[in-house]
Amino acid sequence: MEPPLSAGLLAQAREALGPSIAVAGGRVSDCQGPLLEGEASAISRAVRRRQEEFVAGRTAARQAMADLGLLPRSLPRRPDGPPAWPEGVTGSITHAGGQVLAAVGRLGPGLRAIGLDLEEDVSLPGDLVHEVCRPDEDQSRAIRIFSAKEAVYKAQYMLSRQPLEFADLRLEIAMTGEFSAEFMRPAPGFSSGQRLAGRQMAIGRFVLSAVIVRC
């Protein structure tokens, strides 16, 4: 049986993102609400596991939207992959180890984008370590660097719509969990040398990274 997503992990995610952003989630198998118009076509040819993860992500996102007082809305997949969030709303969805998390917030003076990434705290294969980590990054913390870069990538992509390679971001992670990602090349809306800050936490067998892009 899948272990339940701990209340501690949800609490940590909410603390990292702040009170203005709603976070919802749980076991993928428990988050199987109905899909809304325009959503099913994205997974019509997907394997069952991917279908369940997609449904769980939309279910968790709608719960987070409800927690903000928003009505349930369809979240179809954009042609480039991410959810098409309703006007005035942004968010991020992540899956790992049979668990799902979604974070949603209202766009405004203090919020432009959210990046959330959940990973199982495991060692990465050597070839992936070299792909993820720059020479000046600590390869012994490869899974932490991977998760942080994924969160930053998601957040910046909501604004830039430009793919980035792992080497395009340089990570510094403090022992307290705060991290800083430096852009090593520009992307629309982000200059070379610009930094985004985030928080990372380890709960049980998971690593969670969270980033907010503010105005």
Image: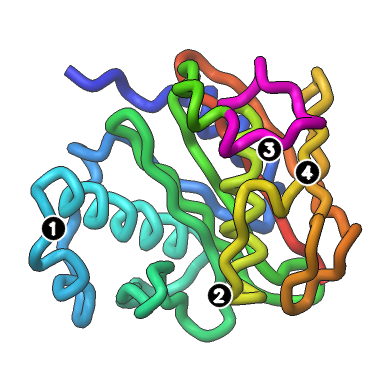
In magenta stretch: residue 152: no
Query: Does residue 161 lie above or below 63 as drawn?
Result: below
Q: Residues under labels 1 and 4: Cα distance?
A: 34 Å
Q: Residues under labels 1 and 3: Cα distance?
A: 34 Å
Q: Residues under labels 2 and 4: Cα distance?
A: 29 Å
The circle on residue 15 is: 3
Q: Residues under labels 2 and 3: Cα distance?
A: 20 Å
| Percent coordinates x, y for residue 58 in the rendering | 31, 60
The circle on residue 89 is: 2
Per the image, the residue denoted by label 4 is 170
User: The residue under label 2 is which amino acid type?
Assistant: Val
* Foreground residue among 179 and 15: 179
User: The residue under label 3 is which amino acid type?
Assistant: Glu
Query: Does residue 203 lie above or below 144 as drawn?
Result: above
Asked which quadrant contains residue 115, the reply is: bottom right
Q: How packed is label 2: few (under 14 Cα within 10 Å), some, or many (20 or more)?
A: some
| Percent coordinates x, y for residue 132 in the rendering | 59, 37
At horizontal 66% and vertical 52% (from top left) the residue drawn is 152
Circle nearer the N terminus (2, 1) = 1
Circle nearer the N terminus (1, 4) = 1
Q: How packed is label 4: few (under 14 Cα within 10 Å), some, or many (20 or more)?
A: many
Circle nearer the N terminus (2, 4) = 2
Q: Nearer the viewer's eye, disc 3 or disc 4?
A: 4
Secondary structure, mark 3, is: helix
Quadrant of the drawing holding the N terminus:
top left
